[in-house]
Amino acid sequence: MSGTASDLERLRSEITADPDNAWAAAANYQPIYVADAAARIAIVGQAPGRKAQESGIPWNDASGARLIDWLGVDESTFRDPSRFALVPMDFYYPGKGPHGDLPPRQGFAARWHPRILQAMPHIQLTLLIGSYAQQHYLGTRESLTATVRRFADYLPAVLPLVHPSPLNFRWLAKNPWYEAEVLPQLRQCVRAALT
């Protein structure tokens, strides 16, 4: 077993045993993320939804189906950990808020992501889905629309994306440039990273 693979196994155990996650352990929740030392693309999202937490499978919902379509891959490719690492800003479902799911916990990604990403040295492309991931990794304080509109500024290593939730249909309708410009570039970058 490679050092990075054993590092990743040890990290998962540390995350599960962390006292900050005791509430999740008490509910028999496992941390929901996928990380493999051979992964080529890292997808950084918000936090698992309720369905993902219950099934133990990230992006196991309508948003995941749309994301797979956006990437231009099939589900078996998307679920291959040697190709895609799925590393949300928090590895546990944060619960329901007044306007959808609660945000990921502050400080969670800062604590765990650097060690996980260090153990995946072959990452060629990082996809930042939603404002939490974009603010954390890009330090941007502009709107999500403005950040995603400037997607070319971050290429070739990083690509900011809007969340593929079906609830974003109004945003997609108001921003036709996303499907016309960003999605073809996304598919091209994914193909290049997986080759």
Image (cartoon, rainbow, N blue to C red):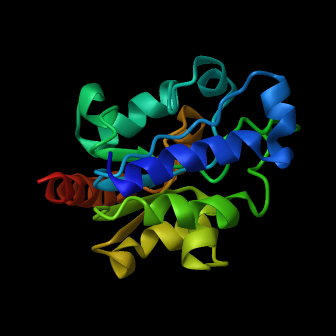
Q: Residue at x 32, y 42 (%)?
A: 70
Q: Residue at x 76, y 64 (%)?
A: 107
Q: Position of residue 3 (x, y in %)?
A: 38, 56
Q: Residue at x 52, y 72 (%)?
A: 147
In front here: 50 or 31? 31
Q: Quadrant of residue 108?
A: bottom right
Q: Quadrant of residue 84?
A: top left
Q: Position of residue 92 (x, y in %)?
A: 70, 38
The N terminus lies in which quarter of the figure?
Answer: top left
Q: Residue at x 28, y 55 (%)?
A: 40
Q: Is residue 189 left or right of residue 29?
A: left
Q: Is residue 47 left or right of residue 138?
A: right
Q: Residue placed farthest to the left in the image?
A: 195
The C terminus lies in which quarter of the figure?
Answer: bottom left
In front here: 12 or 164? 12
Q: Position of residue 115 (x, y in %)?
A: 54, 63
Q: Is residue 181 left or right of residue 15?
A: left
Q: Is residue 134 above or below residue 161?
A: below
Q: Residue placed farthest to the top in the image?
A: 55
Q: Is residue 174 left or right of residue 188?
A: right
Residue 176 visible, this orientation: no
How many numbered discs? 0
Q: Position of residue 124 (x, y in %)?
A: 28, 64
Residue 17 visible, this orientation: yes
